[in-house]
Amino acid sequence: MSHPGSVDIIDFVLLTIYPVAALFIIEILSRVISRTAKPVPSWIKLSIQGITMVGFAVAYTVFLPFFVNQDHTAEP
């Protein structure tokens, strides 16, 4: 039984997987671009990953109330 205002387990897992998937996609794109064109400098890739993670943090802070389960009532 979840607490009032908590996130369901499926939502929690998805909110954990999305940032990891973004990191992998950025890494894969970096490697593909490095094979076809000149290599992508490490600092650019890491900066993009950092900005992406800050974006996820802001999005979760702003949009998490939409994912929160408000259907349960608190029991004494």
Image (cartoon, rainbow, N blue to C red):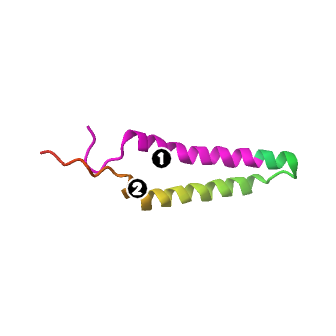
Residue 4 image point, x, y percent: 25, 48
Q: Is residue 60 above or below residue 18?
A: below
Image quadrant occupied by the C terminus: top left
Q: Is residue 22 above or below residue 13?
A: below
> What secondary structure predominates along the stretch shown in magenta?
helix
Residue 31 image point, x, y percent: 78, 45
Residue that lies at the very extreme toward the left in this rendered image: 76
Residue 14 on the magenta span: yes
Secondary structure of the residue carrying tag 1 is helix
Q: Residues within 10 Å of mark 1 (few under 14, many from 20)?
A: some
Amino acid, disc 1: Leu
Amino acid, disc 2: Leu
Residue drawn at the location 83% of the way across and 48% of the way down? 34
Secondary structure of the residue carrying tag 2 is helix
Residue drawn at the location 75% of the way across and 52% of the way down? 42
Range covered by the magenta-colored residues: 1-30
Residue that lies at the very extreme toward the top in this rendered image: 1
Residue 7 image point, x, y percent: 36, 46
Residue to which mark 2 is pinned? 64
Q: Is residue 18 left or right of residue 40?
A: left
Q: Residues within 10 Å of mark 2 (few under 14, many from 20)?
A: few
Residue 20 on the magenta span: yes
Per the model, the C-alpha gap separating discs 1 and 2 is 10 Å
Residue to which mark 1 is pinned? 15
Q: Is residue 13 above or below residue 22?
A: above
